[in-house]
Amino acid sequence: MGEVTLTQTATGVLISAEVRGLSPGAHGFHIHGTGACSPDFTAAGSHFAPGGEPHGFLHEDGPHAGDLPNIHVGEGGNARADYFTTAITLDAGPDHSLFDEDGSAFIVHAEPDDYLDVASAGARIACGVIGRG
């Protein structure tokens, strides 16, 4: 369904996503805390939140590290997005590393994230384990 490229910089991580085959509109797009997609997408666990922060850009104590802006899909079913975050690292060792003992995964959800309620984005419709390329 696509590809997500992560680039570590001196000040954070650039996330570049290209997806296809999705329904038009906004979809929740998050980093989940387990690097597994099988036997179903629930294997990816909950959102990546190494600091224990609550979900949501609009939550007064959020967001957590796995929160990303919605991905917006055009009429043809394709989307391209770039995000920059200081909440994660690709370096091994730190608490906010995506490469901890159980890894991490990207999940695309059926509905848009309302940036407050963790369940607002609905079903998990795509999953990709984050790995070193």
Image: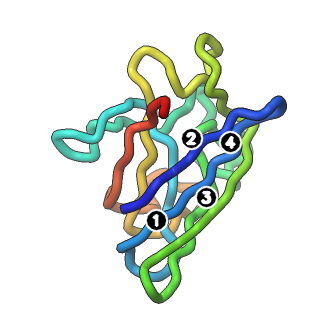
Q: Secondary structure at mark 4?
A: loop
Q: State the CA–CA distance, disc 4 to disc 1.
A: 27 Å
Residue type, numbered disc 4:
Gly
Q: Secondary structure at mark 1?
A: strand
Mark with earlier residue (3, 4) = 4
Q: Residue, x 56% and y 46% (percent of image)? A: 5
Extreme residue in the bottom direction = 75
Mark 2 lies on residue: 66
Residue type, numbered disc 3:
Tyr
Give residue 87's mark.
Answer: none
Residue 86 located left or right of residue 34: right
Up/down of 7 relative to 29, above or below: above
Which label sits in the foreground, 4 or 1?
1
Mark with earlier residue (4, 1) = 1
Mark with earlier residue (2, 3) = 2
The answer to whether the residues at label 2 and label 4 have Cβ atoms under 8 Å apart is no
Mark 1 lies on residue: 19
Mark with earlier residue (1, 3) = 1
Which label sits in the foreground, 2 or 1?
1
Q: Callout 1 environment at 10 Å: few (<14), some (14 to 19), or many (20+)? A: some
Residue type, numbered disc 2:
Gly
Up/down of 44 relative to 89, above or below: below
Extreme residue in the left direction = 39
Which label sits in the foreground, 2 or 3?
2
Give residue 115's mark.
Answer: 3
Q: Position of residue 62 (x, y in %)?
A: 68, 42
The image quadrant of residue 46 is top left
